[in-house]
Amino acid sequence: MPPYLTRLIVIAACLANPVLSVAQSTSENAEARVYFEEGNRLFQQASRATGERRTTLLKRSLEAYVDSLQIVRSRNAVFNAAIVLEELDRNDESFNYYTEYLRVEGLSEADREQASRRRDALRPEVAVLRVRSEPEAAELWIDRKDLAPRGETPIEVAVAPGQHRVFIEKEGYVSSEREMKMVRGETTVLELTLEPIPIEPVVEVIPEKSAEQPMQRPRLRNAAIGTAASTLATAAVGLGLSLRARSLRDEYDRAATLYEMSGNPVDFQRAQDLADRTDRFNIAADVMWGTTIALGISAIVLYARHRKRERRERARLEMSVSRRGGFALVRMPLGASP
């Protein structure tokens, strides 16, 4: 087809198809809409240009649409980018943009028919891979898994002719990998049934208690030791507070004596401050001493319970002697060590 006829067809599509002539709705991001309208303007200019200038304008139009798509994945910008790629003879990319557009929900029958017709017209120029999987919605990668997936199954993707490696993955299923040879103008179909990842039963292993190891009951003993340590710590704090309260009391006595001698209000205020501080330290010291007594009693009770349980579980030897003879008896609780 002569180039001028191609341009006339594209211009007619711009005027007849609201997807090309109407900007994105005002609800979309304003910056994306600016790029979209810039792409439309450059596309209209390219439709009236020829030669190298036409190619330059088409590339600039494509850049504007891509910038818009990076902000908002609008179906209008996707469709327009597909048309520009088609004009630039980048048929593989154009085919894939049409495929993305056709996956948009809510397309009218007219829009869907037009996009399908344009995509089908590209099939003789590209190598198409059609992938179906059971279950569906498996992700597809081609050649490189370090990039974003190409989409989800079922899907059609245009690729360069030649050998390709295809990866299909879905969470909960065994991944699949295939080597495919793609031929221009042909559609290669790949149908896969993904196998679920086997779930291994969880077996709870309960360790057996060794009969050779004696039963250990260190919790009461450890609690008693910890409580005793806390008792010493609080006693030290209480002692420090008491000593500080005594030194403040001495300072108060000197300040009170000085006030009696001088009658200076400053000396009186200092004596009052020292009295207040002395009271606060005395209260704090009383609290700490009370805590010390409570912790000490707790430590004694815990240790007494520990010793009582230890004596109860320990093996005991009892002996009895009389005129008729004597005997020995060993008492051992169940589970205790001899």
Image (cartoon, grey):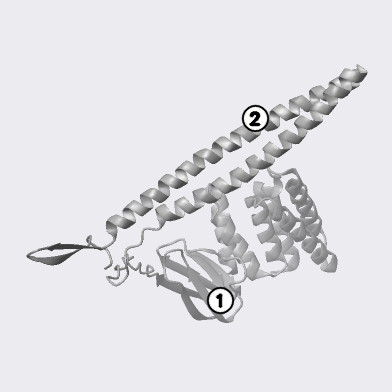
Residue 226 placement (x, y as % from top left): 50, 52
**Along the line of sight, the residue nearer the viewer: 1 or 54:** 54
Q: Is residue 338 above or below residue 14?
A: below
Q: Which mark is residue 185?
A: 1
Residue at 57 percent across and 66 percent down: it is: 149
**Along the line of sight, the residue nearer the viewer: 22 or 198:** 198
Question: What type is the residue that disc 2 sits on?
Answer: Ile
Question: What type is the residue that disc 1 sits on?
Answer: Gly
Residue 17 visible in the current orientation? no
What is the total number of numbered labels drawn onto the structure image?
2
| Local SS, label 2 | helix
Q: Is residue 295 above or below residue 93?
A: above
| Discs 1, 2 touching: Cβ within 8 Å | no
Of label 1 and label 2, which has the lower sequence position? 1
Q: Disc 2 marks which residue?
A: 283
Residue at 70 percent across and 27 percent down: it is: 279
Which image quadrant is residue 150 in?
A: bottom right
